[in-house]
Image (cartoon, helix red, strand yellow):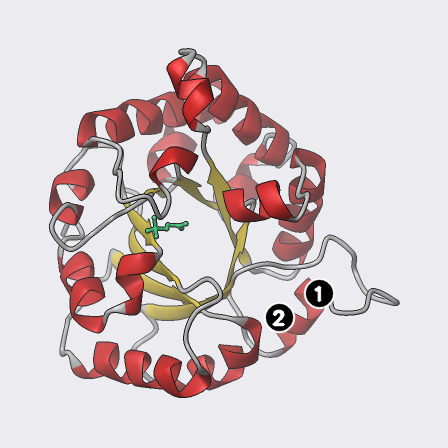
Amino acid sequence: MAKQIAAANWKMNLTAQEGEQLINEILNSGVSLQPEQKVILAVPFPYLSMAIAKVSGQGGNIEIAAQNVSNKKQGAYTGEVSAIMLDSIGIKNCIVGHSERREMYGDTDAVIAEKVNLLLDHTITPIFCCGEKLEIRESGNENSFVTDQLVNGLFHLSADALQKVVIAYEPVWAIGTGKTASSLQAQEMHAVLRNAIAGKYGNDVAANITILYGGSVKADNAEELFSQADVDGGLVGGASLVAGDFIKIIKALKA
Ligand code: PGA
């Protein structure tokens, strides 16, 4: 079975002090994780080292992620953060291809593929986001659209490399809108993605890859979403900023 993950995406929220308090509350909640479960906190760049220090010594199934990385290796790119830099402070995960970056910062499929490659070169797990806008779903083309994102962003990888990637299906119409995909809609798309992976890489690779759902995951809908056969957990924005809610979401992971 694929690893079950509850991932928090703080986006551009919280001060350092608030972030530290939130991590403390999660660590002190006593929530226990099974070996096949993991929690990942994607925090803003300035808090990465603080967050790593906080979770180190917690048994390894709480990890920290960056929310973005440069598609350039190093050099004169003012304001950018490289995979080398993330690796050098012990980062093991990084979100790529989030719809907010695709929409507002021009991350194309090609740029995202470059980021994926640089992360894997530095043994950082890409948390690869894909998902369709409302008009694409309304036109009935969501399966081919999201499959294309998957193919363009990831299918240049070897089977070995692909198995180091976590996928997050996040329908854009469900992000921050309070409108969650139904568990059936989530399951259908996750099965489409897993089948596409099976078609190119075989059933074993497809079965082992973690596919998260994201888009208005909340404390009261997480269990229903995560109970779906092909949903291996969630990438959670708004609800991950409230310790009590995120802890409930962690507890909703499949055992
Ligand atoms: P949301 O965000 O949970 O606030 O909808 C999810 C995401 O963008 O990763």
Residue 28: quadrant of the picture: bottom left
Q: Is mark 2 within 8 Å of ligand 1?
A: no
Vertical placement of residue 123 versus 146, above or below: below
Q: Residues within 10 Å of mark 2 (few under 14, many from 20)?
A: many
* Residue 255: x %, y % from top left: 14, 52
Q: Which is nearer the eye, 137 or 36?
A: 137
> What quarter of the picture does the N terminus occupy?
top left
Does residue 202 appear in the picture of this structure? no
* Residue 149: x %, y % from top left: 55, 29
Residue 33: which numbered mark, if any?
A: none
The residue drawn where x is 25% and y is 48% is 217
Q: Is residue 16 left or right of residue 66?
A: left
The answer to whether mark 1 and mark 2 are in CB contact below 8 A is yes
Q: How many marks?
A: 2
Q: Secondary structure at mark 2?
A: helix
Q: Is mark 1 within 8 Å of ligand 1?
A: no
* Residue 15: x %, y % from top left: 44, 81
> Label 2 sits on what residue type?
Leu
> Label 1 sits on what residue type?
Ser
Does residue 134 appear in the picture of this structure? yes
Vertical placement of residue 246 versus 212, above or below: below
Q: CA distance from mark 1 to mark 2?
A: 7 Å
Residue matched to label 2: 86
Residue 82: which numbered mark, if any?
A: 1
